[in-house]
Image (cartoon, rainbow, N blue to C red):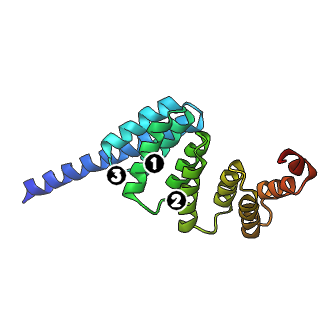
Amino acid sequence: MVKTYYINLIIGFIFICILGCSNSNSQIADKYFEAGEYLKAVDEYTYVIAEDPNNLHAYLNRGKAYHESQKYNLALIDYSVVIKMDPKNKDAYIFRGYIYESQSNFYKALIEYNIAISLDSKDPVTYIDRGDAYYALKEYIRALEDYAKALSISPDNEMAKSKIEYMSSEEFFNSSE
């Protein structure tokens, strides 16, 4: 009985240490990311994932670090892992949309933004992102509708205001001819 108690105590202690170490590495990785040291952040997030393969935070942030390092395919893989583990994680869809946009694959970006909007229709930034993709495709009315939707959700949104103002300007009409 006493032996079982000590074994359970030791196992519990080891488990707490593992969780604490993983959490510590996650915090270190976050600090590297915030400092713009993306490759060091990738290394730390990789360590966290090795310790806890179900850590969505680590996959999502490692994907962002890969993205910032312009390792887009690796970022897409991490974002896809997050989506597989949590299909309602709108951030993973948004970040995949950013990558597709940076690759000028605006139709794929639209698919990602549409999914993100279906998961959270109250986020004005996603409407702006989708509007930007429509704008790049020269679907100006749809872009304007998304910017207006963002502004209706967040009336003080300066980005939406500036995009609407630009699209209402003579400069826009002269450049789009």
Front of the two marks 3 and 1: 1
Q: Earlier in the sequence, mark 1 or mark 2?
A: 1
Label 1 close to label 2 by CB (< 8 Å): no
Q: Earlier in the sequence, mark 3 or mark 2?
A: 3
Mark 3: few, some, or many residues within 10 Å (few <14, many ≥20)?
A: some
Q: Is residue 27 something one can see in this rendering?
A: no
The front one of 2 and 11 is: 11
Residue at the spot 54% in from the left edge and 57% down from the top edge: 111
| Mark 1 secondary-structure assignment | helix
Which disc number belongs to residue 16? none
Q: Position of residue 163 (x, y in %)?
A: 80, 54
What residue is shown with label 3? 54
Residue at the spot 37% in from the left edge and 41% down from the top edge: 48
| Mark 3 secondary-structure assignment | loop
What residue is shown with label 1? 79
What residue is shown with label 2? 90
Mark 1: few, some, or many residues within 10 Å (few <14, many ≥20)?
A: many
Look at the image and tell me in which quarter the N terminus lies: bottom left
Measure the C-alpha gap from mark 3 to mark 1: 13 Å
Q: Amino acid at mark 2?
A: Lys
